[in-house]
Image (cartoon, rainbow, N blue to C red):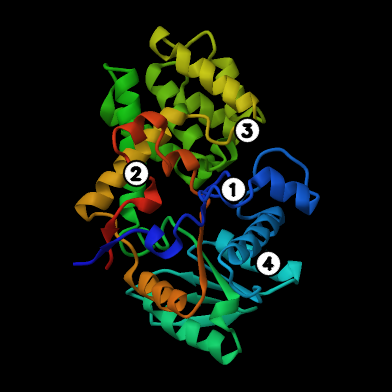
Amino acid sequence: MQRATIANLTADTVVYRDLEPCDPTLPRLAALRARLGMAGGPPPRKRDLAYAQVIQALAHEAQAARGAPPLRALAVIGDTENDRLLAAHLRTLGELAAYGFIGEDRPVAPEALVWQDDTATATRWHLLGPWAAQLERQGVEWSHTALLVDIDKTLLGPRGCSDGAIDDARAEGALAVAASLMPSLNVPRFRRVYGELCRKEWHSFTLDNQDYVVATALLIGSGALDLEELRAQVEGGDPGGFAGALAATADLVPPGLAPLHAELRARVAEGDPTPFKAFRRAELTATLDRMADGRLTLCGALFNLCQSLADRGALCMAASDKPTESAMPSAEQAAAGVLPLHHTPAIVE
């Protein structure tokens, strides 16, 4: 049984949601933005054209730092439409050839590798091999190519395989924080509310942001918010959103939640996309536990392909939209021996 880390492929050429490279020798986001003539503000997300601009610039820097020849191509490997969009945005920039692979194991579907605009969609992860072979037939030279690999539900917990463990880790982290803040928490009800708020019907309110989901479930569990009243507001097009819910509950939260409530309001006002830091730290712990006991694994087909292409000169990068707080330990966690996500071993299968 092989165990390995993401860093065995990428070293510290990894960026999480804040787009700050884990390798301290690579330029910071602010420097890249200045070079590209981009405005400041919150980091762009993977679906944004600005994200593609930053990632491309970072790939050039990482390639030069290792003394390798200039890049001619970028290849995005992921599992979602955001990854497909990243490949499309890279093509739009027009500086380098850009390819994509969007994968998922779908055992009940026929094996298929379908191409559209230099991006392939696959129903099996092992079709990465034929995908790479096709790129070679199209003239891709791996020593001039950067592989931009997604982490969650791609390299780690590949979709259709062990991806459920990623969702479970988030749910466990949410419950752990909720129980620590509210010893009398009705756990079954909290689970039901959390599950309800994860549904797409709530995305106009939660923005599909787990920090908002967990905090809202906690406010409902405390009695400061009513689920059905909130549902009516959301279905009625209430524009207040999560920030509005925080404002409306300022005088209703129990004393035990008051410090968290104040912290959330301040961070949301600052534009912090991951304001619930304690939840994200708990999510990291739950994720690493699952990597340790084998519930959460690395995608063998992808790991082996990246290893092979790296041996042939390809640059391997991990470009993940995962929140940094769910991937990098806090100072306290690091002092206790907790490793960054990409340096934590997991089974390769």
- Answer with mark 1 or mark 4, whichever residue precedes in sequence: 1
Using the numbered discs, state the Cα–Cα distance from disc 3 to disc 2 in whole angstroms. 45 Å
Task: Give amino acid for label 1.
Answer: Leu
- Answer with mark 4 or mark 2, whichever residue precedes in sequence: 4
Using the numbered discs, state the Cα–Cα distance from disc 1 to disc 4 in whole angstroms. 16 Å
Q: Which residue is mark 3?
A: 236
Q: Which residue is mark 2?
A: 339
Q: Is residue 55 left or right of residue 293?
A: right
Label 3: state its secondary structure: loop
Task: Give amino acid for label 3.
Answer: Gly
Residue sitting at the far front:
67
Label pair 4/3, CB-CB below 8 angstroms: no
Q: Is residue 167 left or right of residue 57?
A: left
Q: Which residue is mark 4?
A: 90
Q: Which mark is residue 19?
A: 1
What crowding class fits label 2: few (fewer than 14 Cα within 10 Å), some (14-19), or many (20 or more)? some
Answer with the quarter of the image where residue 105 lies: bottom left
Label pair 4/2, CB-CB below 8 angstroms: no
Task: Give amino acid for label 4.
Answer: Leu
